[in-house]
Amino acid sequence: MQAMKVGLLGLGTVGGGTLTVLRRNAEEITRRAGREIRVTMAAVRDLEKARIFAADDMQLTDDPFAVVNNPEIDIVVEMMGGVTLAKELILLAIARGKHVVTANKALIANHGTEIFAAAQQQGVMVAFEAAVGGGIPIIKAIREGLSANRIEWIAGIINGTTNFILTQMRDQGADFTDALKAAQALGYAEADPTFDVEGVDAAHKLTILSAIAFGIPMQFGRAYIEGITKLTGDDVKYAEQLGYRIKLLGITKRTAQGIELRVHPALIPARRLIANVDGAMNAVLVKGDAVGVTMYYGAGAGAEPTASSVVADLVDVTRMHTADPHNRVPHLAFQPGTLSAEPILPMGDVRTAYYLRLRAVDEAGVLADVTRILADLDISIDAMIQKEPAQTGAPVDIVILTHQCLEKHVDAAMFSIEALPAISGKIARIRLEHLER
Ligand code: NAP
Ligand code: HSE
């Protein structure tokens, strides 16, 4: 059978890893796909840097449009990153009748709905397994393996860079900036690493997971996003003392009022498997009504782990290339036209538990004032510790863990407590997730 001809856009961390894996495992991949998958063209900006990948049967170009416009190419693989040019190239490839594979979560989270509609119309496939969880086949697991279930919630460590930074800070006492530099050198970080540390990259991935789990359109703009830059060493230490670990979590949950879509640091009981996912590893918990809680674990970033997902998509597309477009697995798991309009909940209406750290003057009545404010807002305390003052008369740290309550009540409580004369500075608030049912 004729080879499937592939054009790559980008030969950086992911593109380079993809070419390496395709070349190294060519024979096994052909046996799986049913025909050879041959890269015949690749586009980069810096041709000199890309010479290490040169081969007689692969043309290198610095014009990505030359790849997309090449009539010989069956599948375009976008691994350039960015949104504007990547979107233009992908829509052009679709218009030219080519299948598309992409690792670009920013693009899918922001423009997936438009891209899938264009692909649907042209009868071509757009595959994006590498966009979430690096090498973990989480899209396939939710879209196909769990298709019997009504998904109830998903919670995941879905950014390798921040998990790597948090692990380095906790285990090695590393400085935030040094840990970020190490993650960049290892190829984990985004071109703009603020996307990683401010939670934006995790929110892109969560938006995609939420869409395929609940059959809703991509709604990145409605996600609540909080990164790891405001976490302090004190909070990491107090959390450990209370039996918790702090992780950057992406959480999406179906409730009677709507869908939660939120990325933020969270305390997780240290005994949970997911609390022990360290370094650049990712893990995603998915709760289905039939299967219960399942967990998917693996490398969340880096050249070959991500290539593993890109190449799996290439094999899938090759296998399905000749199938009737109406009988392929739908891009967003649910048949187009059956997407639901369930609303995304505003953060104030989210119910969860909280870790609150406040700094107070060590004198009679302060705790009574604080607990009265909490009780008036129906916030019940689960645990509380008061740390020793650094020296006599110095302010003390009070750490409170609450039971589940409404976020807007916690907002109101924090406002009132911060206004008490005995309280200095801002209250540190970290959400707490038990992740058990
Ligand atoms: P990268 O290392 O910066 O590589 C980007 C590649 O695209 C380079 O080869 C670059 O060429 C090329 N490129 C960029 N703009 C171009 C243009 N206008 N014309 C031609 N070539 C262009 O990025 P990456 O880490 O591989 O990430 C690529 C995509 O995969 C992003 O969407 C990212 O979010 C996603 N992703 C990354 C990872 C990861 O672990 N890194 C994991 C999952 C998904 P030059 O080198 O010549 O500039
Ligand atoms: N920057 C991303 C991360 C790459 O650190 O997880 C993988 O998507």
Image (tube, grey):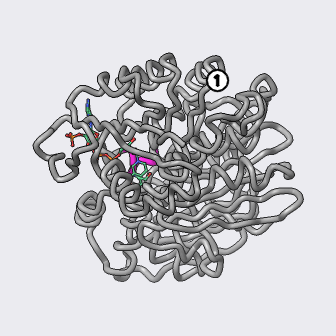
> What residue is shown at x 44% (from left), y 64% (from top)?
163
The correct choice, above or below, for 317 with respect to 279 in the image is above
Q: Amino acid at mark 1?
A: Gly
In which quadrant of the rendered image does the C terminus lie? bottom right
In the picture of the structure, the residue carrying the numbered disc 1 is: 123
Which residue extends farthest front?
1
User: Which x, y percent locates residue 210?
Assistant: 67, 42
Q: Is residue 69 left or right of residue 34?
A: left
Which residue extends farthest right?
290
Q: Is residue 148 visible?
A: yes
Q: Looking at the magenta stretch, what is its main secondary structure?
A: helix
In which quadrant of the rendered image does the N terminus lie? top right
**In the rendered structure, does residue 418 fall within the stretch colored magenta?**
no
**In the rendered structure, does residue 198 fall within the stretch colored magenta?**
yes
Give the extent of the magenta segment. Answer: 195-200
Q: Is residue 411 left or right of residue 81?
A: right
User: Which x, y percent locates residue 416?
Assistant: 59, 47
**Front in this rendered view, residue 132 or 376:** 132
Check disc 1: other Cα within 10 Å, few if <14, some if 14-19, many if 20+. some
User: Which x, y percent locates residue 327?
Assistant: 77, 33
> What residue is shown at x 62% (from left), y 45% (from top)?
319
Q: Is residue 373 visible?
A: no
> What residue is shown at x 49% (from left), y 60% (from top)?
422
